[in-house]
Image (cartoon, rainbow, N blue to C red):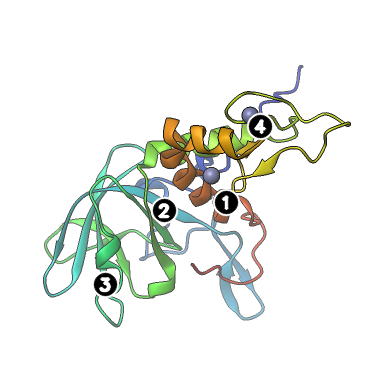
Amino acid sequence: MPRNKKPQSILRNRVNFPPFNGLPDEAEIDLIYWDEGPFGFAPSQHWCFLGEIVDFIGLARVLLYVKDKDGQVITVALHTDDRGRALAPQVKKGHTVAVLYGEQHGFLDMSVGLRVENASNIKIIPCSLEQLLSASDDIAAHRGQPRHCGSCGKENTSENRHCLRLCSRCKQASYCGEDCQKKAWVDGHKVDCKALAGVQWFAGKNWIEFDDYFCF
Ligand SMILES: [Zn+2]
Ligand SMILES: [Zn+2]
């Protein structure tokens, strides 16, 4: 059997980055995510919900309406100390919200979603969910490949190993010089860069071994 060599795109993983229906239910212990240890149940791996903001309300507390990977729209209610006030300036339709260790919650009005109590478990990434997922695919596809200029395509060779420099924001795109970097920025990297930078945080962590909780 030929091995599937396609590199894994981290954010496409549906165990560590599940849609709402794949999240553990707060009413029961989900053994996909929890293990019984000497001090009771503890997570056995990390998980993070990702969804795109389709609408929001911000009166007494910030409520986000968020569309997950499967297109289901759920509510994300901010029950943090400041009720989401600090997060509010970043809330925009079309941007992506990431919630660490979220569990399926049923609200009193019969809607379902996530109740976020810890402000360091939620962050907003300034790009759409689709842009974030394709940035994750791009990073996987280029892993281990020789770098080339993101504008003119010039490759890194052993002779000119240091000719390419990385974009300081996303640390993914590389360019042979300032002119190529400026051109690529205007040609669209300005948008892609935010998504690539957004993936960096996730890509730099080990999601399948639990040591301590991550926080944003
Ligand atoms: Zn170039
Ligand atoms: Zn960049």
Residue reaching furthest top?
Answer: 1
Q: Which badge, 4 or 1, comes first in the chain's sequence?
A: 4
For image coordinates 52% across by 50% down, the residue present is 197
Q: CA distance from mark 2 to mark 3?
A: 18 Å
Residue position marked by numbered label 4 in the rendering: 142
- Residue that carries the numbered disc 3 in the rendered image: 84
For badge 2, the amino acid type reads Phe
Q: What residue do we see at 39% from left, 36% from top?
A: 130
Q: Earlier in the sequence, mark 4 or mark 3?
A: 3
Residue 5, image x and y in percent? 71, 25
- Quick one: SS at disc 4? helix
> Which numbered disc covers residue 49?
2
Label 2 to label 4: alpha-carbon separation? 25 Å
Q: Which residue is mark 1?
A: 200
List x then y, in percent, for residue 25: 38, 59
- Name which residue type carries label 4: His
Of the numbered discs 2 and 1, the one sitting upstream in the chain is 2
Dot in front, 1 or 3: 1
Query: Of the residues tagged 4 and 3, which is closer to the observer?
Result: 4
The Cα–Cα distance between marks 4 and 3, rounded to whole angstroms, is: 37 Å
